[in-house]
Structure formats: structure tokens, C-alpha cells
Image: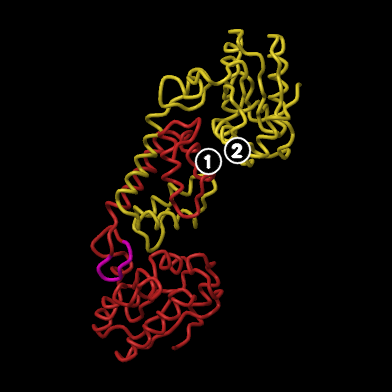
Chain colours: A yellow, B red
Amino acid sequence: MRRTGLPPPISRLIDSLSKLPGIGEKSATRLAFHILKLPIQYAESLAKSITDVKSKVTLCPMCYSFTEEALCDICKDEERDDSIVCVVEEPVDLVAIERSGEFKGKYHVLHGVISPIDGIGPEELRIKELLSRLGGGRVKEVIAATNTNVEGEATALYLAKIIKPFGIEVSRIAHGIPVGGDIEYIDEITLSKALRDRKRI
Amino acid sequence: MRRTGLPPPISRLIDSLSKLPGIGEKSATRLAFHILKLPIQYAESLAKSITDVKSKVTLCPMCYSFTEEALCDICKDEERDDSIVCVVEEPVDLVAIERSGEFKGKYHVLHGVISPIDGIGPEELRIKELLSRLGGGRVKEVIAATNTNVEGEATALYLAKIIKPFGIEVSRIAHGIPVGGDIEYIDEITLSKALRDRKRI
């Protein structure tokens, strides 16, 4: 987009920034001018940190969260309880739960949620990878920590249905968190409570 | 900052993003995960647009706004009225005024405002550069379009005091914009009105 009074490089930066979620034209303009006034070192380190996440970060082949190494820190950690697996929709949900400090088991990231209206069925998610982990026999409980909206609840029920035949308990984080809310935005205390009050489904 | 469950490159990106104005830890986390899911081309173009603004953009030696070339587009534009100069605090204010479509003269960017409490006097701003432009004799009116807070008003009065001896009229954008507000956030219609209703000081 062409903007009067703005050199093309600034205009291009505003275009790029305004494609990010929650950043409109005015916020993008403010950010672009802020970046212009920053020391060159900071602007370069910001640019490098953006390309670095894309080039250095991959998915952990065990839990499918993000990792810089062969296995992620949580999967590698032998002090964490590998008899309990917390299943989340996205890596950002894992980060929110870690921030609560309540959970000391392992994770599994689905990378989405069952949503027929968007054409996403179980085969589009990391569910068969979860089942092959459960086949190992060490896991005694799976916590379905998907969001508490319709798709999240449906995915939790689907997980319960297919996991119970393994003889593994399936629980659901408690409805201490507001129905319809996104896990990543919940405060730590509510998340702790929701993890403690989980109930069998 | 070290964050449990996050590979260092993601943590570094969150650190960099959360230094930007208006972006806290949670927004930065959301943005970082969004960037991770973007196609590599977009992430690279975002990174490039950040380094480009720093390497390609300089200050116009006439009006001190940002430019990619020797002179900025507005200073080069011979169809704009060079007998009237609108003085703003920051380039972002120029962009806001251009968006209103009301002003067809030239600009001068001070890069700040007189603020004794922050140790910023007239000599820290582009005021002597403004005076040397006015010495040319073509300018008939200067509009003081600094913000309407205490420092902006004081700077406008200071400009009036030093510019009037040149025989040049000094006007102030009208108080149609809320007192204490920042020019860059005002809607186009109010800005148009404020420019039309400017009064002599």
C-alpha cells in the first residue's frame, strides 16, 4: 500500500507488521516509527530473532511442541512424570500451563482441534502419534487440556473414547476457567485450580 | 529471560518483541507463536523490512522527515505550496496530517518538543534548521502543529516568539483536538477541522 509522505521501506514495514494478529494500521505505523528510532543493533537483533525462530526451531518428534534440539527440554527431563500426559491444542497452551507451575508430567501437542466445519478431523491432528506413545504402556493418565469451547470439548470426548480402551484414565481440566475462553490467556492461579480439579470423563 | 518449555530462539524473539511499545509479555508470546506458524517467506520479508528501514531510510535535509532519497517526496513536490510550513514534533504526526488530506503546503519536523524537565531545549530540536529555511523569504506562514499538551503549547509559543520577527505569520492548529491528546491518534475529520480553524498566536 502506498502512503503519502512515507518512503516505501517504511510503508513496506507497516504492511508487514499490520499482517500480525491484533496489530492494525495505526499500531503498525507506531511500531514502524519506533523501530526507525531504535539503535541499529536492536533492529538487527529483532530481525535476526525472527529469522532464527523459523530456521532453528522444529517440532519435537515425541510431544510435537517446538524445540531447538533433537528432543524438547520437557521430553528429555527424566525428573518429570512420564506416566501422565497433558494433551493441548497448541504449543502456546503448553507455555501457559508451564507458567502455572502446577503440572510436572509430560505433554502432547495436537496442533489444532477437531472442527468438522473447518474440515479438520482427527487425522489432521497429532492423534495417531499420541496413540503410538500410549502404546508403550508407561502412561497411566491423559489430561485433555483442550480449550473449553465446542471444538475443544468435542476433541476431549473423542480422545476419551479412543484412549480408554488402552486401560488409561482420561481426565479433563476443570471448568474453573471460563467457558469459551482461550487457555493461553488465563491467569496462573485459575490454571492451577483447573489442573487440580480435573475430573474423569 | 529463560522460559520453561520454550526453546531459546522463541524466548529471544519474545524478549525482542516485548521491548516494542504497547507489547507486553503475553502479546509478545502470541506474536512469536504466530510468526513460527507463518510461511518462511513472510518471516524473512518481515525481518528484511525491519533491517531495510534502518539501512535505507535517512532524514530529509530540508524538512527532517524520513526519506529514502536525497530529498523527501513532499519537499520535491513543486505542486505543494512552499509559502506555508507546518511544523510537527515527529514524522508520525506528518503522516497523520497527510492522511487528513487537508494540508497542501510543506512540513518541518522538530524531532521532539521543548521539555526542560527532560533537559530538552530549543537547541536539541531542528529549530535552527527551520529558521534557516525561513530566512529564504518564500515562507509567509508557519503552522505550529505540535501536540496540545504543556510541552507542545510551550514549543508553539516559543516558535511564535522567534519566527514573528521575520515578518512571518505564525498560527496554531485549532483546539478541535482533545487537549492532552497525541496528534497521531486523532481521526482524519477532527484533524481537517483543526487545520481549517487554526488561529494566529
Total numbered badges shown on the rendered structure? 2
Q: Which residue is mark 1?
A: B30
| A131 vs A122, nearest the viewer | A131
Query: Whole-Å distance between the Cαs marked 1 and 2?
Result: 9 Å
**Do tags 1 and 2 sit on the same chain?**
no
Query: What percent of the width, then of the height, locates residue A28?
Result: 46, 53
What kind of secondary structure does the magenta stretch mostly adopt? loop
User: What chain is tagged by disc 2?
Assistant: A
Q: Which mark is residue A184?
A: 2
Q: Quadrant of the C terminus of chain A?
A: top right
Rate crowding at label 1 as few (under 14), some (14 to 19) or many (20 or more) other CA atoms within 10 Å: some
Residue at the (27%, 65%) spot, across then down: B60
User: What chain is tagged by disc 1?
Assistant: B
| B153 vs A117, nearest the viewer | B153
Query: What percent of the width, then of the height, locates residue B97?
Result: 45, 69
- On screen, residue B26 versus residue A149, left or right, reads left
| A16 vs A59, nearest the viewer | A59
Residue at the (51%, 80%) spot, across then down: B174
Name the element at disc 1: helix
* Stretch of the chain drawn in magenta: B60-66
Residue at the (68%, 9%) spot, across then down: A166
Rate crowding at label 2 as few (under 14), some (14 to 19) or many (20 or more) other CA atoms within 10 Å: many
- On screen, residue A157 versus residue A43, left or right, reads right
B110, above or below A72, in the image: below
